[in-house]
Structure formats: C-alpha cells, structure tokens
Image (cartoon, coloured by chain):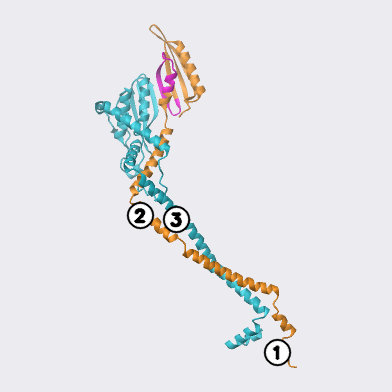
Amino acid sequence: MFAELQSIKSLDDIRLLYFKYKDSVGFTIGLALLLIGVTVLIFIQIALPQANNWFSIQKEVADTTSRITLLKANSAMLAAMDPAIVDRQFDLVSTALPFEKDYTGFITAIDTATLISGMRRDDYSFAVGNLSTKSAELSPNTVISVKIKITGDADKLLVFLQTMQKQLPLSEIVAVSLNSGGSNVEINFFFKYKPDNLQIPFTDPLRALTENHKRLLKTLEDNAGAAQAAESIAPSLIEDEDSSGSAL
Amino acid sequence: MNNEINLLYSKKQLRLYQLTTRVRILRYIALGSLFLICGLSMLFFLFVIASPLTSLRQEEKALIETLSGSKDKVIQQTLLITRLNEVDSITKKRSQYDLVLQTVMDVLPTGAEIGEFTAEKKMAQISVSSTNLEDIEASFTKLKTLVQNKNTLSQVFMNSLSTTVDGDGNITGFTARLILSLL
C-alpha cells in the first residue's frame, strides 16, 4: 500500500486508491480515528470555550440580577424616605457626634450641666490642636479632653454627672474627684471627621434604620430637647458665664 | 490463471474488507461523538446568543443613572447609619460614674455623708462620715450587699476607719476602695 501511496501522481490515482480501500478495515479504523481526533479538536477549541462562556454569562446574569434587585430596593427605599425627617435625624446625630471639634457645643454642654446641677464652675481650657490641616482630619484621635473644676456637694455632683451623660455632643466622664475643696472632672468630648471623598457604590445595600437606631434617635432627641429646655429656662445665666475656651 | 486479471478477492484480501463488530462500533462512536460535540457547540452558541445579559446591563445602567440623582441622599443615609452605630458604641462603652455615685448614695443611711468621691477607670474611692456609729456600720453592710449583687461593685476594700472629736460628739468615718463592675 505504501508503494501505491508513493506512486500517486494525479487526482485520479487518489480517487482510484480511495475506491479500492474505502471499504477496508484499515481505512474505516483510520477514518474513525480521524473523526475522533476532529471531535476532540472541536471539543477543545469550540465546545469547551462556548460552554465556559455560557457558564460565565450565567454567573454574570445572576450577579447583574442581584445587583438590579439591590438597586431597585435602594431606589424604593430612597423614594419612601421623607427628606425632612432624614435631614432632622442627620442633624441630630451630627450634633451628638460632630464632624469637627464643636467647641461651642462642648462649652454649652458643660455650662448646661453646671447650671442644672447648681454647681459653680471655675475657668477651664481645651487642648485645641490643629483645626483645619489634613493631618488633623486624618488623626485617629477623636476626643477632646477638658478638665474642669466645679464646686458643690455630692448631690450636686451627681446631678452634674447625670446631666453630662445626656448632653450633646456626647461626652464621657473619664475621671471625677470630689473633696472638700470642690470637684475635679475630666471630660472627653467625642467627634469624628467626615470621610474625605466618600464614595458609596449604588449597588451596596442601603441600610434602613433598625429598631435600636430608632430608640437611640429618640433618646438623643429627648436629651437634646431637655438641654434646650434647660437653656431656655436661664439663658442669661449661660451667656453670663465665663466660657473661656482658651486655646493651648 | 494469472492473478493480475483475477477479479475475485483472495482469502487474504477478503480479510482486509471484513469489518468486525468492534470496528463498526468504533465507526459509530466516532460519528456519534462528532455529531454530539457539534450539536453541543451549537447549543451553547445559541444559549450565549439568547442570553438576557445585554438587556440586564442596560436595565442596571438605567437604574444607576436614576440613583445618581439621589447620590447625596444615599451618602446622607449611609453616614446617618454609620454615625448612629458609633453613637451606640460610645453610649454603651462610656463610663457610668454617675450610676456608681447614685447607687452608693442610695444605699447609704441618711445620717452618713459622702466627704470624698474619686473615680477613675474601673476603680473608685469613697469617704463616708457620720456622727452616728450605727450609720457607719449600716454603710458597711449596704456596701457588702452591693458587692454580693455584683451589679455595680465587684469588690470593696476598707482603706481606713477613723474617729475625730468634734465639739459635742465624735465623727466616725471610713475610706473604702471600690472595684467597679459596670464599666
């Protein structure tokens, strides 16, 4: 047969060889193996990439569908929100935890607590630090510490401490010391800078207020209301107080 | 007779053309797998063509464009939730010395008076005095009860006990160190 293959000179020779061997076992096996080879080739080169492509598309479809569901939910939530209420809640929370060092708020909180408790307050000062520099905004330190000296008995000190717990901006009594000479109180006021260039992907689920958040807002609202009421009772007293927020 | 002009196959040549069952099966398998793979390729191709991905992407894009108009509201809502979580964390973690003082004042007898009160971190110190020794004893007992309850105080240490002569009578006082449990 190899001699015959070598003697091929024209297309007719090939045709002759084909008709001679087309029903032979060797030709059939050869053809079958060739078909299997072509099949494998098609499988690797076409079918497999097509299947991969389809599976990746299916995954993308699932992802896109879930993103669309989220977007629709976000859109519906935004539509259902009352901008006035959100603004008020945002203002309230910003007062509780200011975006910057709210010295006026800090001084007012101390003055209100002093006024309500009936204690007498001496001069005090804040460690101001940087106000507008980039490093100040990036600083992890989000408390302003103030040490004050107040005069009054234990009952008044208790009222002062209780009032400070309810004042906005939020504060924490870090240390307290009462003796016959008066009381020294160290207060930390909290604040937190607004993140720079805040980017929120629309595909992130927009969170709604939980029951806990609503309770917290109610408490903050009550505390803010109580503080305002106290200020309105004796506004002149607050104004007359020497609130010397001298920078160190 | 010359073999060259014999049109009949010899036995050897006949064997060459007798397809066995195995060869037939191989032929069918080869053909079948080729058709199967071609069919599968076509099927996946049609699936890809018919995929709703393009329309979904358009829908997503349209929704994002709609939401872009409410970008400020989205940021405001996100900041509101974040701030509220932070406020919640602060209010839960901050010290409650007012509660400590309140608890101690509530349990002390009316005759006993707090002369000194110091609190820092998880510790407090208190000085109580009274002209009546029974008040001092009652104060001890009440403070011990507070420790047993473990709500406010976890431990109480007596630092000193003193008596001062003051005009008509004696003033008895004690200083105690309190380990706080609620902070």
Q: Chain of mark 1?
A: B
Residue A55 percent location from the top left of the image: 51, 60
Judging from the image, what secondary structure is the residue with disc 3 in?
Answer: helix
Judging from the image, what secondary structure is the residue with disc 2 in?
Answer: helix
Mark 3 highlights which residue? A64
For the record, the magenta segment spans B102-123
Going by the numbered disc 3, the residue's amino acid type is Thr
Q: How many marks?
A: 3
Discs 3, 1: same chain: no
Going by the numbered disc 1, the residue's amino acid type is Leu
Please indicate, yes or no, whether residue A18 appears anywhere in the rendered image.
yes
Mark 2 highlights which residue? B65
Residue A43 percent location from the top left of the image: 56, 68
What crowding class fits label 3: few (fewer than 14 Cα within 10 Å), some (14-19), or many (20 or more)?
some
Q: Say which chain is cyan.
A: A
Q: Chain of mark 3?
A: A
- Quadrant of the rendered image containing residue B33: bottom right
Q: Say which chain is orange.
A: B
Judging from the image, what secondary structure is the residue with disc 1 in?
Answer: loop
Of residue B107 and residue A190, the one placed in the foreground of this image is B107
Query: Would you say residue B71 sits in the magenta stretch?
Result: no
What crowding class fits label 1: few (fewer than 14 Cα within 10 Å), some (14-19), or many (20 or more)?
few
Query: Would you say residue B112 sits in the magenta stretch?
Result: yes
Of residue A127 and residue A97, the one placed in the foreground of this image is A97
In space, the residues marked 2 and 3 are separated at their CA atoms by 15 Å
**Image point (47%, 63%), residue name:** B50
Discs 1, 2: same chain: yes
